[in-house]
Image (cartoon, rainbow, N blue to C red):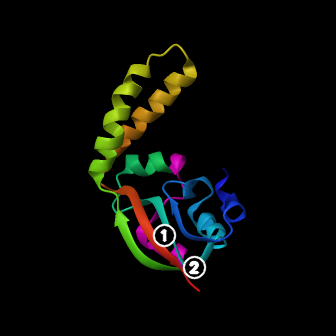
Amino acid sequence: MDMADIPTVFPEIDLLWAEGAAYNIGFANALISWAKAIKPDGFAVVTELCWLREKIPNAVREFFRSEYPEMQSVVQNIETAEEAGYKIFNTYRLLTGAWIENYYDVLEPRAQSLANHSDVAVRNFAFEALKEIETFKISEDSYGYVFYILQRSC
C-alpha cells in the first residue's frame, strides 16, 4: 500500500499507528496526508528517525547525508507536526538496546555471511547493512527512532 493512499483507504479513523512508514513519503507529507483520515481529536502514533543531539560524529552525518538527507531533530519534527495540525500528546525515544538486541544482533551475522555471496546484488545489500551497523556503533547515540504521539486538532 502506498502510504499516501491512507486517507482513501481509511477515510475516517480514530487511531493511525505508523512505525517507520512516514519515511516512505516524508514525515511532513505523511502527517499532512494522514490528517485527512484521522477524525478530529483522533490520534496518530508515528515513529521517525531523527537526530537526538546537536553534536553528531562526521562519519554519521556523512552516512545520513546520502541515506536520509531529510532527517530532522526531535524539535524540528515537533514543529512539523504542529504545523500539520497536530497537538503533541507525548514523545518517546526507542531505547538503544532495541536497535541492538532486536535488530542489529540478528542482522549483523546474517549480513556477514552474505558478504561473499556469488550474487553482486546480495553482496551489495550485505555491505550496506554492515555499513549501517558500523555507523550505529560509532554514532554516540546521536540519532534514533522517536515515537510521536499526536492528537489531531479539531
* Depicted 120 relative to depicted 10: above or below: above
Gap in angstroms between the C-alphas marked 1 and 2: 10 Å
Q: Secondary structure at mark 2?
A: helix
Q: Secondary structure at mark 1?
A: helix
In this rendering, position of residue 89 left or right of residue 138: right
Q: Is residue 75 rendered magenta in the image?
A: yes
In this rendering, position of residue 54 left or right of residue 10: left
Position in image of residue 86 (x %, y %)? 53, 79
Position in image of residue 2 (x %, y %)? 67, 52
Position in image of residue 23 (x %, y %)? 55, 55
* Depicted 131 relative to depicted 66: above or below: above
Which residue is pictured at 40% across the width and 57% down the height? 145
Q: Residues within 10 Å of mark 2 (few under 14, many from 20)?
A: few
Q: Earlier in the sequence, mark 1 or mark 2?
A: 1
Examine the image and state in which quarter residue 94 appears. Answer: bottom left
Which residue is pictured at 70% across the width and 59% down the height? 5
Residue annotated with mark 1: 77
* C-beta proximity under 8 Å, tags 1 and 2: no
* Residue 81 seen from this side: yes
Residue type indicated by callout 1: Asn
Residue annotated with mark 2: 83
Examine the image and state in which quarter residue 34 appears. Answer: bottom right
Part of the protein shown in magenta:
65-82
* Depicted 147 relative to depicted 120: above or below: below
Q: Which quarter of the rendered picture does the C terminus lie within?
A: bottom right
| Residue nearer the viewer, 81 or 90 | 90
